[in-house]
Amino acid sequence: MDEGSTGEPPAGLGSGQGDPTDPGSSAATEATPPSPPFTRRALSTARQVRSRARDVRIGLEGRGRRMVAPLSARAEHEVERIRQRFHSPLHSEWLAAVMGIALGVSFTVCFLTGLIDYLAQHPPSWFHLPVHPINLFRVTEGVHVLTGIMSIPLLLAKLWVVYPNFFTYPPVRNVAHALERLSLVPLVGGALFELATGVANIAYWYSPMPFDFTTAHFYVAWVTVGGLIVHIGAKITLTRQVVSHRDGEDAARRAEVSVEGTGTPADTFGGRGFGNGLTRRGFLATVAGGAAVLFFTVAGETIAPLRKLALLAPRNPVIGPQSLPVNRTASGANVISDALSTEYRLVVDGRCKRPRTFTLDELRALPQREAGLPISCVEGWSAAAEWKGVSLPTLLKLVGAKRSSQIKVESIEDQQRPYSNSIIDPQHAADPDTLLALELNGSRLDLDHGYPVRLIAPDRPGVLQTKWIRRVVVL
């Protein structure tokens, strides 16, 4: 504004407030009529309400922050106080990654072999174990049990290495972090459940399990593997970086922070140790040694050369009637009187041309076949034995059944009991080593081993090698 200006508009320009000298003023007035008074009041009231609501919201947020701040600070202080106790540099990302890889491998092998074993025990229409090699189920079941046993020290070591990570603040940083932490519930909980119930199963300790072990073990395994897959997806990049030492310096700094104030030097990647404590290599050697001890003290129940070392094995596979263990006795199955009855007959019927019954003497008069076959129990023990009896294909030929028939064998046991009957697929039914056994290891079949007649076939779970057979049905 020029000096001496009064601030008034020059003459002839109008005041901008509808002055008659302003040619556009009347036109604007005519184009935009003034709002009614009640509309202006409503708009003003709405603005006041919005302003008041905003003030209330801001006030509440401020009050909430003032109320939460002390609790948040206290929680952060408590978490930090707890974490200060985790001064061991062994709580490192490198060790967590290595233990995670070892545990992931053992869990994967255990899951896959367990899946095969479950399908072998409860075969759907599309799955059957092959007849040969005859030791396939023996190997998969043995590997399943042994990897499960060896996973115990691996899991405990992994949890010890990473448990400081359970105490973080804030507990959840974002959605991805929340999903990662949620995946630990099925992973850790399922792993503990699987290992605990698995050990109880091989020890025949079923009283703490008010559920069917096989079914629960199978489905919880899927839940656990689901949690493992999510966890691997969340940690695979970090694991790759840590193991390849690409963030070695950051890991070293974190280790130094973890021992700050303890007077312990943090030599993270040198392998020379942490002061006078356990070295990283010593920790790994301790865990590996624990797993090895469990392997050698249990594996003898299925690996014959290690039998003398099997101090922790629940069963010695050469102790029992006719040098073979027994899971279910004749007394426990309540079959003694029927099995020893002179009226015993083996019935062969179904889809065959000449159904008939056989006395025990008639079965012994038929051509006999000998076969060296393992008996493999789902609890992890197994042993080779010599069996002698009537070859199933020979019996099927006598009654005029097709060689490729599917067969059902039924026990004297109550048919409502689990594994009181089993289905023999056509491949096994046609194999000459599938026997209706009458003898074991050179003598008459013991009552607890299935006298008068039991099934023994190549590569089948022990629970499906039906004992005390009274009927063979051609399906």
Image (cartoon, rainbow, N blue to C red):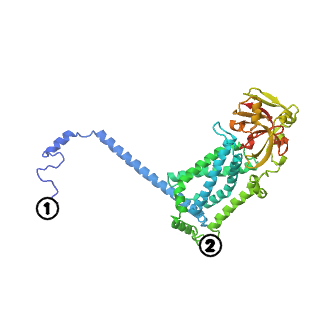
Return the residue found at the far right: 342
Return the residue found at the far left: 12
Image coordinates for residue 465, horizontal then vertical, percent: 75, 40
Q: Is residue 415 left or right of residue 245?
A: right
> Looking at the image, is mark 1 or mark 2 earlier in the sequence?
1
**Residue marked by disc 2:** 275
Image coordinates for residue 24, horizontal then vertical, percent: 16, 44
Is 429 located above or below residue 224 in the figure?
A: above
* Figure disc tally: 2
Return the residue found at the far top: 353
Q: Which mark is residue 222?
A: none
Q: Which mark is residue 4?
A: 1
Tell me if I can see residue 34 in this picture.
yes
User: Dot 2: what SS?
Assistant: loop
Q: Amino acid at mark 1?
A: Gly
User: Dot 1: what SS?
Assistant: loop
Q: Residue at x 60, y 49 (%)?
A: 225
Q: Amino acid at mark 2?
A: Gly
Q: Name the one closer to the observer, 209 or 27.
A: 209
Q: Which class describes the residues within 10 Å of circle 1: few (<14), some (14-19), or many (20+)?
A: few
Is 270 located above or below residue 344 in the figure?
A: below
Q: Residue at x 54, y 62 (%)?
A: 242
Q: Name the one closer to the observer, 436 or 181.
A: 436
Q: Are marks 1 and 2 in contact (CB under 8 Å)?
A: no
Q: Name the one closer to the observer, 450 or 244.
A: 450
Q: Quadrant of residue 149?
A: bottom right
Tell me if I can see residue 164 in this picture.
no
Q: Name the one closer to the observer, 67 or 427.
A: 427
Placement of the C terminus among the 4 image quadrants: top right
Q: Quadrant of residue 405?
A: top right
Image coordinates for residue 341, horizontal then vertical, percent: 87, 33
Q: Which class describes the residues within 10 Å of circle 2: few (<14), some (14-19), or many (20+)?
A: few
